[in-house]
Every structure is written in structure tokens, then in C-alpha cells.
Amino acid sequence: MQVKLSDSPKEMNHAIEQAKKQQSISISEFFTKNRHLLGFDNPLKAISTTIKEGVDNSLDACEESNILPEIIVEIKPTTKDRFIVSIEDNGPGIIKEQVPKIFGKLLYGSKFHKLSQTRGQQGIGISAAALYGQLTTGKPIKVISRIGEHKPARSYELHLDTKTNEPEITKDIETEWTRNHGTRVAIEMEGKYHRGKRSVAEYIKYTAVANPHAKLTLIEPDGSKIEYQRATNQLPVKAKEIKPHPDGIELGILIDMLKGTSSRTLQSFLTTEFSRIGSKTAKQICGEANLYPNARPSRIAKNEADNLLQALRNTKFIAPQTDCLSPIGEDLLERSLKKEFDADFFKAVTRTASVYRGNPFKVEAAIAYGGSLEKDSPAEIIRFANRVPLQYQKSACGITQSISKTNWKQYGLQQSGSNLPNGPVVIVVHMSSVWVPFTSESKEAIAHYPEIIKELKLAVQECGRDLGKYLRKQGKEKDEAKKLSYLEKYVPVIGEALNEILGNVNEEEITRNLKDTLERSRK
Amino acid sequence: MQVKLSDSPKEMNHAIEQAKKQQSISISEFFTKNRHLLGFDNPLKAISTTIKEGVDNSLDACEESNILPEIIVEIKPTTKDRFIVSIEDNGPGIIKEQVPKIFGKLLYGSKFHKLSQTRGQQGIGISAAALYGQLTTGKPIKVISRIGEHKPARSYELHLDTKTNEPEITKDIETEWTRNHGTRVAIEMEGKYHRGKRSVAEYIKYTAVANPHAKLTLIEPDGSKIEYQRATNQLPVKAKEIKPHPDGIELGILIDMLKGTSSRTLQSFLTTEFSRIGSKTAKQICGEANLYPNARPSRIAKNEADNLLQALRNTKFIAPQTDCLSPIGEDLLERSLKKEFDADFFKAVTRTASVYRGNPFKVEAAIAYGGSLEKDSPAEIIRFANRVPLQYQKSACGITQSISKTNWKQYGLQQSGSNLPNGPVVIVVHMSSVWVPFTSESKEAIAHYPEIIKELKLAVQECGRDLGKYLRKQGKEKDEAKKLSYLEKYVPVIGEALNEILGNVNEEEITRNLKDTLERSRK
């Protein structure tokens, strides 16, 4: 330290005292203390979060390698409040060097720096589960992996060092395994298993709904087995990796990109590092920013980059390409809903892609109404993000907010204030994006970006309008049927009255004529 | 890598392909992409989050050095959508080595590893603001600091490297400054300034309420100045640093503590590393865990540690000491409420300390009712955590949940379902703890730990019961007054009727007698 204690009066001592206490915080220490941020606030959530993270990884790995996923989830009790939670897949397997990092290092992964739709994105999930397991039971994390039939399967045990966020393999042996390739991770942890709302079983069921190409098996603590067979043998179209869209790009990112590019001119930088910028537009942008199209990107000063940013912001770009996204699709969404719910009305909508902070995203929504759905309760909301069901933090989620801030009375539903609408309704919403912004690392609720809220609202409103039409038509038909039955009831009386007034008319004929007229007037 | 591409069939290629994409993610990259987690989701929040983080740090630093805080916050527009946000304090100042780390490195600070109540805890806040400023304007962060009158003030400029989370001083000069000691940080950023609900002005106002010993000045973008003078020259009693309480300790933490301790015996480990364990209890615990009290802590095996944990869990400890907490206090809370709101009824409660996951915490609540408070709207909720007002994510907060899940009808308020109660009510809740668990790094809402929810509910219920009594009394008085006025109205009629029936009685005397009887019966 520059300042010596000897030459410092009292005030300086304060600054020096405080300086001594300053220190770095490792990311694992941080999340150990804040483990509720990762979805480990209680024993119930601990198990379901672990399974979510494991299954997400397995599905991603299989799809990336064009393998139809086959996933087995098992929860096995060891003591009254401890369980071994395991997730097994038929994915490509993991090479030895990567095993400790993938399962034992926070902020490590393959999806963070990539712009394409995946379930995992942060490189935190499964290592957080491992951290929690070790924290609550002290037991090592067990991983079996095999990368092909010509290689033996290997069985590993891992220890995580919280102080350094560095994992370590404590055991590594060859083992027998029936699978030719795949990975199995088993973590012992304190937990609680339950059924019903927000249960593991519910999570697996909704995962099957959004991933009809996956075979999923759940073995519960009591040994009972739930299986979801594939509804299709077709893998979803693979989401492509894209370049960032110029809409919503930020100065800091732009400066980093200018520094890091291998393009030799500003024009080629714009056309190759961004999507949706052609040479003509690139030239225009350079012109507006008062920069030469053949200027060297690395030589662009900060204030010049700022001008470039303003020019980008003033330019209208076409919407981002959508092959980086893998939505469920209107048809499949409606079919899934029909499979799960007994209702009279169904409607599904997939919106065109939109952009927030440079990230393309797409919203899908679907509504089911009537039938045997519960009449006197708030609408049931089912939320998905990148095909992953969201089970917790409903009220903090942008999806829920968009639904409750929509005026459902105009679509024929009851609603008090800004609450969810009431009635026999199920509303499903799916947001897919190259980067879903969540309200916390546990990925349970979508953050309230205005661009996203807008699309969410438009999607549910589109479904709502069709529901409104349907309900009005239903109402009208009911009204007319009522009117008709009234008239039919009184026609004979009118006939009788006419007979009395005019005398000597054929009552039966009058009644028949009146009925005919009525029929014709309704056509 | 162990596996060569040459000897690997197709399946192995998949594993190797995926391995190549794996990489570490720096914490700054992570939070740049996830900046909504830190409270920087939009230009409006960006400014208020920056000020919150800056003011929190200033208050903590002043109190730690026994200085009565004097803080000036200024928001100065530079362009239509850019502002320089600055926070200046009369704290102890910061020595040069610490300046870049405190303002430019995420996960760096003095409060994370310490068990005592402070506003900051994570070592993220102000560096996140700096990161956001640099990201949106590319401008350096400016810091002036002086550590005593015998040293000159220094002016620094900082640059943050997002890829490595390492800050750098780009400019460092001596400068003139009127203060003898203190720090001023100025960050230019994209932002939006607004007034009213959830504004910076509201934040400063509530901060003054919870920190009557601080002098606060806010200079708004249009130059208008709002000042809050001190209500007291007394610093709050300093929160002491404590050892963890044995309740809620976890195995992983216990194992780390056993490894890291300088105690030579298990018994002394228990009595010195934890609070509230005396020698007698320590011996009992060792006995129950089947361990020798003089065993070496570093030699305790994992399964033995597990036994020790079970023994700890089976032991009843006295509540943690509360000198690590600095609550506002019933009196001051009620006085602050009275100063801010014109109401008829006031009640404030400070609960005794409780523990969640080993962390002591205390809940305070206060209610104001009636007067000129708005009659036909939901109750106004004012939330504090460690004396910091919480302005966002109301519906995700444990405080709001505890209030809306309380049955307010029993206390005489209207309430529909699990919504907030309706009526002319303000409810203030303050949670103070050595570690407040928030639902995200932006520290806007308290996480839903069952132990905390329970205390929150008990605190508001305690206020609620008194409100109920007050309202029932009010209601009774109203009812009786009504009854009396009825009776008084009919007494003359009864007199008249009696006269008619009995004849020849003194109507006036009867009326007077009846009235007297009535009066007496009410006493």
C-alpha cells in the first residue's frame, strides 16, 4: 500500500482499515450464499431444479448431435430427507477433460457465446445442482459417460472447491455400461419429493408436450414409473447460429466488436459481423456516420463508434432471420393442447420474429376454452421458454403480467382489475429466443423488457379475439334459440286469438303459416 | 485431448465437437448479457439503481468510520438520453489500490464474508453501474477521493475490461477538492429521469425516513434541489460482526469450517467458531455425535461431520444475539410514519430476532390508518431491507406476499381473495439481517424463505390485531351512537304513548326518566 500507517492521521486510518477488509468473492461462494437465485431455496425446489437443469442439458446435447433424445430421470431416497437424483441420456457423451468443468465449474459452457436457441444458456445450472448436493450431503458427484461403442464407458467422481470454483476428479475408472454413448449424472442431495402442482411429474409432462420428439421416463422415489413415448420421430429443425442483428446493439458491444473483428474495412465489418446489413446499407450507414467505408475497424475512435451507433439506430433493418429459432408451431401447439385438455374451443398463434437488444425472439400463444375445464377459477397459465416449462415465480413473469394486463372482458371473459381472467380457460405461452432474459439465474420467470411484453400481449390478444368471436357467436346462437322457442310457444296462441277476432279461420293453417314465415325470416 | 480425431468413429466426433465449443464465461460478460439481473433492464431503472448502489456504499462507509453521513446525489443531462450520475460523500475516502477494484471489478468487496448488517453485501452494485455506463456511452468512470486533510485529493478515470473482469486506471492526477475526506463517483450513462412513483426522489425520501442520521441532497436534471436535513445527530448503534449461529448450518459449510479452523479441539472449535455454543453444550454435542471433544477438527471425516451436523440439528440453541442487527426501532418507525402520513391510527412493531440458514434477522412492521389516506385503493406498501427502500418487483417480494396472504377481514379491512387489503392503509415493513436473501442481484425483492415469511406475517399480524381492535372500537362507538340517537328519537313518542294508555301521567317526567335510565344503562 502507498500510504504507511506511520504517517497517517486518524482519518487516513479509516480508509486503510476499510481497504484491509476488501477482497475478491469467488463465483461459487457467491452462489452458495445466494443459492435461492439458482432455484435451490428449499428441498422441494432443489430436486425439481436439478432435474430441470439435467434434462435441459441432455435435450440440448442430443439435438446438437442429431440424436433422438431418450432420457431417464430417477429419484431414489437414501434417508428420510436425502435423495440421489440422476439424469441419464443417450447423447454424444463427454470427453474426460470436460467432465469436471461441465459438472463442477460455475460459468462454464458452450452456449453462452453463441446466438442460437438452446435450453441452457448460462453455464451455471448443473454445476449449481452439484454444488448444492455437495453442500447438503458432502457426497461426491458421480458421472458415467461414454463417447462411442469403440471406447469403454468411464465412471467419475467429482469434488468442487467452493473457494476457487475449480472442480477436481477424485475417482476415474473404466466401467460396464449398456449404452453405446450417453451420459449419466447422479447427485445426492437434501430434498423433498411431492406430487401435483409444480411437481417433477408435471415438469416432465409439460416437457413432453413441448418436445414431442423426446422419449422421457421418470422413476419416482416409490419406484413407480411414468413414461412418455415419442409423438414424432422427427427431430425439430435445428436452430442455426446467427450474427447479431443491428437493432438494439450497444456502444460497448460495438466497440468490442470493432476491436475484435478480422474484417479489414468498416463496410465488410458491417456486412459480415451483423446479420441483415448488405453492402448498400453498409455504405449508407458509413456515410451517415461520416466515416469512410474502407476505414480500418480497429482504428475507429470512441466518438466515431458513437456516430456509427447513432447511424445504425437511425437505419430501418428488415426483421432478423428466424432460422436461429425453433418454435413449437401453431399446429403442434394446438394438437398438444387438444391432447391434454378436454375443451370446446382451441386457438394457437405463432407470431413473426421480433428483436430486443439485438436478440431475435418469437412468441407463441394458445388458448383452450370450455368443455370440462374448471369454470369458477382463474385461467390456468402454462409458460414455456425455449421449450422448457417454467413452473415457479409465476407472478414475477412477463408472461403472467402480459396476460393479466390484457383486457379480457372485451373477449367475453370475466376479469376483476388487473388480475388473471376467470373462467374455463387454459392459456399457453412459449417464448423462444437466442437469449431469453430471465429474472434470475434459476430461469423461472421472463424479465419485463418492453419489446417482449409487447409481443406477448399481441400473441395472447390474437388468441383472445378469436375466443371473443367464438363466445359472441355462442351467445348469439343461444339468444336466437331462446327467441325462437318463445315464438314457437306463442304461435298457437296467436292462431287462437286470430280465430277469435276474425272468426271462422282455419286455426291449424294459420299456425302452420306463421311457423313457416318464422322459419324463412331466420334464414 | 485424450481422444484423437483419427481413431474416432462418428459418435466420438460428436463428443469432441461439443468439447471444442466449451469455454469459461467471465462474470462481467455474464452480467453484461444479464444486466436486468442487476437492475439495469431499462433507462429509467438504470439511473435509480446506480444511485441506490452509490448511496448504499456511502452510508455503509460513513457509518463504519463513525462519520455522520452527508451525501449529495446529482443527475446532470449531457444529451437528450444521457446523464452523468454522481454520488458524493464525506466518508473516509478510498486508497488508490482499492479504487479500480471497488468501482470496476464485479464480486469484490468488504461485506460479503462478514456477518453483520450492512446495506451492500455482494460486491457487485456500483461496479455494475460502472459497467452499464461504459456499455452505453463508452465513457470512462470518474472517481475523486481523499483520505484525509493531510493528503491531496486524487482524481481517477477507470476502464473496465469485460472479458477479464479486470479494471484499469487510465488517468490519475492530484486535484483540488473542498472536502477533507470523502469520495465522489460520476458515471455517464444512457438513462431516463422521471418523477413520482418509484422515482429517485421517492428513493431519497424513503432513505431519509429509514436513516434519520443522514443528510441527503438530490440535485435533479433541471437543477432543482431537494434536501433532507438530519432528524438526529446520533449515529445508529453500530452492528457488530458475529460468528454464525448453529441453526441452519449446512454440511458443506461445516466441513469447510472444520478444515479452516485454528482451534485444536472439536470442543473449542464449536465454542469459538459459532455463536451461542458454550462448553457444556459443546461437550453434549460431541457426545451425541460419538466424537471426542478433544478430537482434532481437521481430522474429522465426512461421515463424522455428518454425525456432528445431526447432533447440532437435534440441539436447541438460544436465539442469536441481536447486536449484529441495526433495526429502526418501534418508536422511530412510528414517528417517521407520523411525519410522512396524515392518519388517525398508528402502530409499529419490532419482533425479536429469528434465524434462517444460520443468519439472524429481525422484522419490523408499522401500520397507519384513516385520516386523509386514500379510501378506495389497495393498501400502500413501503418495503425496506437493511434500511434501504425497495422500489421494484413488489409482487415478487416476500413482504408483499406475507401481507396479501394475511386475512385482513378479521382486522376489519376489505380484501378480495389473496390480494392486498383495501382501504386507507399504509403498511411499512423492514427486514434487517446479516444477509438479506434477495430474489436477484438487483436486490429489489426478498426471497421466500419459510422462516422469513413466517416472521413477516407475524409482524404484520401483530399490527393488524391492534388495527382490528381500534376499528372494532370505532365501529362499536358508531353503533352505540346510532342506537342512542334512535332511542332518543323515540323516547318522547313512548312517553306520549304511555300517557295515552295510562292516561293522566306527566309526559315530560316520563320522558326525562326514560332518558336517565338509558344514560345509566350505557355506563
Image (tube, coloured by chain):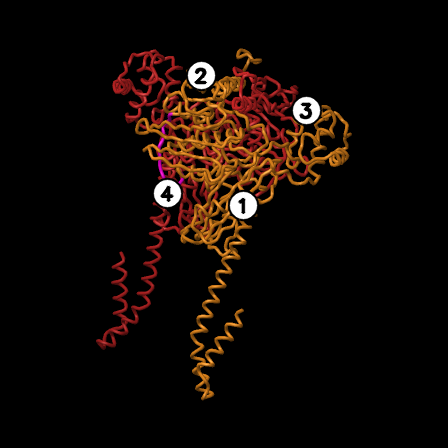
Chain colours: A orange, B red
Residue drawn where x is 66% and y is 24% of the image: A260
Magenta stretch encompasses residue A196: yes
Q: Which residue is mark 2?
A: A169
The residue indicated by pointer 3 is: A259
Tag in front: 2 or 3? 2
Circle 4 sits in a helix, a strand or a loop, which is it? helix
Q: Does residue B302 lie above or below B445 as drawn?
A: above
- For label 4, the residue is B463
- In this rendered view, identify the residue nearer to me: A417 or A474: A474
Q: Nearer the viewer, mark 3 or mark 1?
A: 1
Q: Amino acid at mark 3?
A: Lys
Helix, strand or loop at label 2? It is strand
* Label 4 in the same subunit as label 1: no
Mark 2 closeness class: few <14, some 14–19, many ≥20 residues within 10 Å: some
To which residue does mark 1 refer? A330
Decide which of tag 1 and tag 2 comes sooner along the chain: 2
Query: What's the amino acid at mark 1?
Result: Glu
**Cα distance, mark 3 to mark 1?**
42 Å
Callout 4: residue from which chain? B
Foreground mark, 3 or 4, reads 3
**Chain on which label 3 sits:** A
Considering only vertical position in the picture, is A91 above or below A446?
above
Q: How far is the residue under mark 1 from the one under mark 2?
A: 46 Å
Q: Earlier in the sequence, mark 2 or mark 3?
A: 2
Farthest residue toward the left? Answer: B502
